[in-house]
């Protein structure tokens, strides 16, 4: 994904954004859904918007358990992780009609994991020439408004598609 130009991630990468004490993915489920941008809570995993997205609608599927490596997750958690990945893809298809997806995990800091101690799966929708739109809104303030908008667009779809 390195070819995506994401200037709004610079504050994050430079360490200018405040980072919470402790593990981000352990802290977030303790917050309100709307402030944490949690779009769906499952039994063993939850789905959250990436605050520093690679693209419009960038989601992450995260187990509640603080586990660093995928091979250490139990089978039930892996099954829900993948089921919620499927649901996320369905939601994003319905909301934004992407032409493709990048799905993946960065395991370990050397592989680019932002939160290396807590395994999570990225769901990034892709369009041909998709960075053009994002570079226009590449400012922190605009990104915050846009995250709210994305949240309110996607959150009800998780409810609806899960009920189907
Ligand atoms: Zn954690």
Image (cartoon, grey):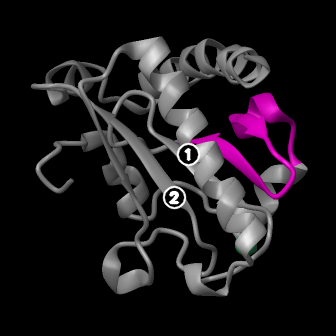
Would residue 59 appear left or right of 30 to someone viewing this image?
A: left
Against 18, residue 35 (above or below) is: above
Q: Is residue 20 visible?
A: no
The magenta stretch spans residue 14:
no
Q: Are marks 1 and 2 in contact (CB under 8 Å)?
A: yes
What percent of the width, then of the height, locates residue 54? 33, 43
Q: Nearer the viewer, residue 112 or 90?
A: 90
Instruction: Identify the image quadrant of the C terminus.
Output: top right
Q: Residue at x 35, y 15 (%)?
A: 97
Q: Quadrant of ligand 1?
A: bottom right
Judging by the rendered image, the residue that carries numbered circle 1 is 85
Q: Nearer the viewer, residue 94 or 65?
A: 94
Would residue 1 appear left or right of 138 to someone viewing this image?
A: left
Q: Nearer the viewer, residue 68 or 161?
A: 161
Judging by the rendered image, the residue that carries numbered circle 2 is 121
Against 84, residue 106 (above or below) is: below
Q: Residue 155: which quarter of the image?
A: top right
Mark 1 to mark 2 CA distance (whole Å): 8 Å
Decide which of tag 1 and tag 2 comes sooner along the chain: 1
What secondary structure is marked by label 2? Answer: strand
Q: Residue 142: which quarter of the image?
A: top left
Numbered range of the magenta stretch: 31-50
Q: Which tag is nearer the camera, tag 1 or tag 2?
A: 1
What secondary structure is marked by label 1? Answer: helix
Q: Residue at x 30, y 29 (%)?
A: 138
């Amino acid at each position: 994904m390195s070819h995506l130009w994401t200037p709004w991630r610079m504050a994050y990468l430079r360490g200018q954004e405040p980072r919470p004490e402790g593990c981000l993915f352990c802290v977030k489920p303790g917050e309100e859904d709307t402030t944490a941008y949690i779009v769906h809570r499952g039994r063993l995993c939850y789905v959250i918007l990436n605050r520093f997205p690679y693209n419009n609608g960038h989601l992450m599927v995260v187990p509640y358990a603080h586990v660093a490596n995928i091979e250490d997750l139990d089978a039930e958690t892996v099954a829900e992780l993948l089921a919620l990945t499927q649901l996320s893809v369905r939601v994003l298809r319905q909301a934004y009609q992407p032409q493709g997806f990048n799905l993946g995990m960065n395991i370990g800091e050397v592989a680019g994991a932002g939160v290396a101690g807590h395994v999570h799966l990225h769901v990034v929708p892709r369009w041909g020439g998709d960075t053009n739109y994002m570079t226009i809104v590449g400012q922190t303030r605009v990104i915050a408004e846009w995250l709210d908008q994305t949240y309110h667009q996607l959150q009800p779809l998780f409810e609806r598609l899960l009920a189907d």
